[in-house]
Image (spheres, rainbow, N blue to C red):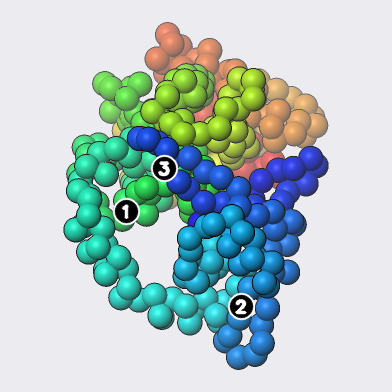
Amino acid sequence: MYLRRVRRGRGFRYILRESYRVGDAYRHRDLMDLGTNPEEYIVYPGGNGFYFRFEVEESLRDQGIEYSSRDLDEAFLPFLPLHIRRVLGMFDHGTGGARTKKLERTEDLRQLQEKLHPFDKRRLHYLRFGQMEIGGSQDQWFKFLHVLFRKSRDEIEHILEGMEQRLRPTELRNYLYAALELAAYFPHHRMRHYPGALDQEKVDECFLEELCRLNGDPSYLLGADSPGGEPLHPYLVRYLILYFDSGDWAANPYWQYAQQFARGRFSRSRPFRAELAPREACRVFGVSYETFQAMTRKELIRDYRRKAKESHPDRGGNHEVFVKLAEAFRCLLANKP
């Protein structure tokens, strides 16, 4: 049982849902529409106590839904005050082991893990460890993957979406690069696990290609609702928005180090600093200082991508020109609010 935030019309509503098994797949169903504010269904009599309005439990009983008080507590957990969440966490400590042991007695955990989609494993692995190079570890046994067992596609997306909200904006592209395993498109590149050092246009193309491949993967969308004629499933539309709204690779502080390392100039003892003055950077970049001042940040990034594509060594461009262009771009980006 979980609380899902869904778009309805021009706003959002919260729907109480549950996952249930149909054959070899898990689907989800709506149990109750809680409107725009689920907190209205929680009553606090005093102290750390709370209970749910009778409408919630009455609705579940009328539908014949089997549930426990813990199921409701976990579903409404994000809407409870912090001090109550801490108390519940204290009581939950030590109960997970019993639940896991019961699961171990009834099902083969390794078989359940093998049924998880690789995209789900890579996402959770990055969210847990923050590693760009996952490699063969996605095929290893990890206990933290239990959270995805016996869940519908919708509930899995709900769990991961909540965890993704803790990522910093500068981590989003690295996260998607690792989750979609885009390094596989650059098998012989020495910087394949450092996307900021790669041809950005090529990385963008690989991202879109892999997203479309995932969109047509029946094993990923097993048990999911049809997108209703939309070319891209809503579960993947949000990644398309996150990827292109998270800014350029250059906004990531590690991008500068990756660029220097790719050119053999990496030094741990000396952090990167801009060596060009803005007017000199404009000259190298090929725009007047007045034009640069009138450009927006997005226009500057778009212009850099076009110029970098023409001069990138992997596409037959001049290495020195590419290096100078990148340095000029970093300087101009640092001076653009």
Q: Which residue is at 34% across, 28% downward?
A: 183
- Circles 1 and 3 in contact, beta carbons < 8 Å: no
Left or right: 47 in relation to 85:
right
Q: How many marks?
A: 3
Would you place residue 80 above or below residue 130 in this image? below
Would you place residue 304 above or below residue 33 in this image? above
Would you place residue 111 above or below residue 146 in this image? above
Q: Amino acid at mark 3?
A: Arg
- Badge 2 is on which residue? 51
Q: Which residue is at 25% across, 39% downward?
A: 114
Q: Which residue is at 59% across, 37% downward?
A: 238
Would you place residue 94 above or below residue 203 in this image? below
Q: Which residue is at 68% across, 72% downward?
A: 53
Q: Amino acid at mark 1?
A: His
Q: Secondary structure at mark 1?
A: helix
123 and 204: which one is in front? Answer: 123
- The earlier-in-sequence mark between 3 and 2 is 3
Q: Amino acid at mark 2?
A: Tyr
- Badge 1 is on which residue? 146
Is the residue marked by circle 2 packed among few (<14), some (14-19), or many (20+) residues within 10 Å? few
Left or right: 142 in relation to 283:
left
- The earlier-in-sequence mark between 1 and 2 is 2
Q: Gap in Å between the C-alphas at discs 1 and 3?
A: 17 Å
3 and 318: which one is in front? Answer: 3
Q: Can you tell which mark lies on residue 21?
A: 3
Res. 296 image quadrant: top right
Q: Secondary structure at mark 2?
A: strand
Image spot of residue 182 (x, y percent): 38, 28
